Image (cartoon, grey):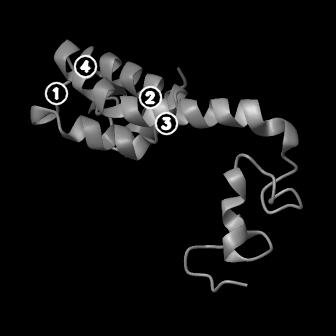
Amino acid sequence: MAVSALHFYERQGLINSRRTSGNQRRYKRDVLRRVALIRIAQRVGIPLADVAAVLALLPDGRTPNRHDWQRISQRWQAELDQRIHHLQQLRDDFTDCVGCGCLSIDRCRLANPHDQLAKHGVGPRRLLQPNDPPT
């Protein structure tokens, strides 16, 4: 793995190292498990802030053990299941999609199932920010 990635993780407080008299970083063996957990989480799209929050829950900043990993993975399972559902929906319903806020908004099964947005008026309803006034 790139040294820059390790330095980035360290700046984010996800791992730590000690310095030699020559100012080289040295990582303990248990940091490998933290790095593996971080990489797995990133691979499935879990934000580093969420990883940091979970690692901060470990007593004395220790490395996750098997029991910890079970708790962590259960914590993330609902979020991952929801992402999988949305990706499957996107894959299955993408055929009719021309793009968010486009002319297909009245029939878009992704952004507007059963034309629920029609009751809010015409136009690209999904592009509005939460505090935008209705058009």
Q: Which mark is residue 128?
A: none
Q: CA distance from mark 1 to mark 4?
A: 15 Å
Foreground tag (2 vs 4): 4
Outermost residue toward the left in this view: 60
What residue is pinned by disc 2?
41
Name the secondary structure under disc 4.
helix
Name the secondary structure under disc 1.
loop
Q: Quadrant of residue 124?
A: bottom right
Residue 105 can be seen, yes or no? yes
Residue in front for this viewpoint, 120 or 51: 120
Q: What amino acid type should be assigned to the residue bearing mark 2?
A: Ala
The residue sitting at 79% across, 75% down in the picture is 122
Foreground tag (2 vs 1): 2
Q: What amino acid type should be assigned to the residue bearing mark 3?
A: Gln
Name the secondary structure under disc 2.
helix
Q: CA distance from mark 3 to mark 4?
A: 19 Å
Q: Quadrant of residue 26?
A: top left
Mark 4 closeness class: few <14, some 14–19, many ≥20 residues within 10 Å: few
Residue 104 against residue 97 in the figure, above or below: below
What residue is pinned by disc 4?
70
Q: Which mark is residue 62?
A: 1
Residue in front for this viewpoint, 29 or 98: 98
Q: Which mark is residue 82?
A: 3
The residue sitting at 85% across, 61% down in the picture is 102
